[in-house]
Image (spheres, rainbow, N blue to C red):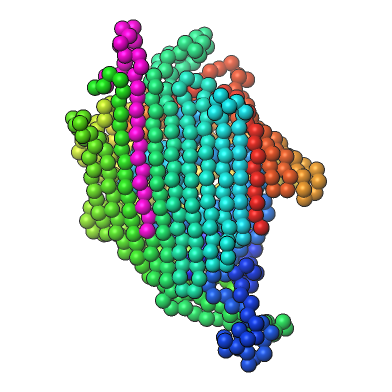
Amino acid sequence: MQAVGTPLCAEIRDSLRTDSTQMRTFAQATDSVQIASPVAADSLGRAANGYDSVYQYDGHLYARLPLPDTIGWITAWRIDPSAWTYSLQRWDSTATQAQYYDYGALPNTTSVRLGVAYSPLQTDDFFARHRPTASTPFPFVAVQPYLDPAPPLYSAHGHTSYFWTATNFRTNKGDLFARWFVTQNVNPALNLGFDILHGSEEAEYVNLQSAISRGRMQASYAKGRLYLNGYAQLGKLTFSDNGGIREDRMLTDTVVEPETILVRQAKAQSLTRSQDYLLDMGIDLLRRYDERIDSGQRILYRYSRPVLSLVSLHTYRRWARSWRNSNPYWGSDSLRAFDPPYISRTQTYDTVAIHHYHGRLGIAYSQQHPGGFTLPSLRIWVGYEHLATIAQRPNQYLYPSSSTGEASITAGLNADYAGKRLDLHLHLHASVLWARVGESSAYFGGVYRVFADPQGLTVEGSLSLDQNRHSTLAKSYFSNTVRWDNLPLLPEIGHTQSLSLRLPSLGIELGGRHRNYQNFTYLDSTSRPKQVASMNVLGVWLQADFRRWGLIAGGRLLYQVNAHTEALSLPRFSLFARLGYEYTLIKGVLTASACLEGYIRTAYRMDMWNSDLGAFRRQLQRTMGSYPMANAVLSLKWKNANVFAKVLHLHSGLLARRDYFAAPHYPDRAREWRFGVQWFFYN
């Protein structure tokens, strides 16, 4: 895959160790093989040896790629630009869980959302949450799972296409989702692809709806000494927000009709636009040539491998968020007392934006054996980073926005080793000069396979250290409703330790993670940034996935604890479980399945949504949770296509209570039906 010696084998083993994975040799990647005639072989200096044919692997895209052999999954490559690492993304084409049909949600866990799909999201699993950074400050964190998923670059092998659409056929409500993903190796050196999606949903409650649109074009090219890979992605997320129920006394009232309950905002809307671009490239400076001989078939295999390469990675991000709250009731004496104190009688309008560029240039060394990957691999680089933050200015209503620019010199190192039983990874990154000097991250992790069998016991552990210097928005922010200036925020430092045990043959995983924070930063109950000098968070989980004899069972139990509940409140326990059955109607052709999934979390003081800031903040008044929720899925699978029906919030109306809340002040969705088709095309 990577002409610059990127350590992919470790990522493949890590991503697919729960499957019956076999690492195929390059000789099986027939779409990237050139078969030379004896005349062509003579040009390689081998005609005198009398070989019938010569297979020349000259570094094409798929000639470098070990191919996973999995059942029921399709795969595509992803890149993490911040760490400059690569991994595999898997999709489950068996489609037995309702959460697999829920775009933006994390499988096997619960989340805080605002009563409608594609709305701002905060997962209950603290270690799965995005933390604000300089390039993704707090107004963008809650929508990051929708607009900035780690993008698949191209398929693992051959052609992959994925189509998915769902609706409840109530066109007046606008409940619709559709996604089409395609990646195609046009020839052995070139891969092209695109990924487009659109989704919209309107809740039962007034002025609460959301819509997302996102599109990406991607391309990869590798031939000879040159490697190029890149994508361009555009996105837009619109969220019309009523602010939730206005008065706390109405939250559990069982007498007042919903139509008479006042909301906190008459007509508010946020619009987040995103642009992301990436270019990853390399030129091999020194290459190695290896040969393998099949004397029985009289075939010579000749491999060309990079040893020393010049590599470069360039990323550019431009995100903007605007929030407008109209006030159509101005002038009514009976309602004027409830109108917000904005300077404008008609509306308030706030806008923030970031422009972020990071370019890196480095040297990569890789040691590879013919027919497979053998590491260590080493990559070291220096870079230039520029960040521009655009926000409101204080007391300036004719020219309300100003831009603050920051430039930094960065440096980094990645060292990876992948063996038959042991994988080791060391990733270092730091800003060494200018504006953001001192910002750094370090990661050291490893995977040890106790037995030679990949389905045997696996131990994985890691240590990491991150130091984050806050964005300009965290230190100074001005709007019509919330403002602060020159806050003395210290850099946030996090130390993380993680250990997990996996038994892939039984689908069992037991793990724990601990993180110690110095200067943990959060938005307090007044929506202002605040810090805690020291805080510890501990999470322990047990996960199981059982699929035998048609039975589908499993789930995830998560335990979390931290001492500073005024800064961070988490459910002590959260449980997700599923139980289903799959029945083969026609072997290899037609399969029917039914699955029920339920989840519950202990009550806790979940964060409240701040509409104008676009972020979750702390609240200390209300405790929510401790009630069961459930979804159901019926699926009829014909080869690689699923025709499905799902019921969201099956529990709705079954109990005589009305405190099923997605977030403080936001009632959860009523029971909903969805019908759709999910179709995978792959080789």
* Lateral position of residue 98 relative to residue 587, left or right: left
**Residue 636's image quarter?**
top right
Residue 433 shows up from this direction: yes
Front residue of 69/429: it is 69
> Residue 100 at x, y = what percent?
59, 41
First to last magenta residue range: 314-342
Residue 367 falls inside the magenta stretch: no
Front residue of 567/41: it is 41
Q: Residue at x 40, y 53 (%)?
A: 277
Specify the farthest residue to the right.
Answer: 586
Residue 323 falls inside the magenta stretch: yes
Q: Residue at x 42, y 22 (%)?
A: 242
Q: Residue at x 61, y 85 (%)?
A: 41
Residue 596 shows up from this direction: no
Specify the farthest residue to the bottom.
Answer: 48
Q: Residue at x 57, y 86 (%)?
A: 43
* Lateral position of residue 348 relative to residue 87, left or right: left
> Residue 568 at x, y = what percent?
38, 35
> Residue 376 at x, y = what percent?
47, 70
* Total number of numbered discs in the rendering: 0
* Lateral position of residue 456 relative to residue 289, left or right: right
> Residue 200 at x, y = what percent?
52, 32
* Lateral position of residue 636 relative to residue 445, left or right: right
Quadrant (top left/top right/bottom left/bottom right) for the C terminus: bottom right
Specify the farthest residue to the top.
Answer: 334
**Residue 581's image quarter?**
top right
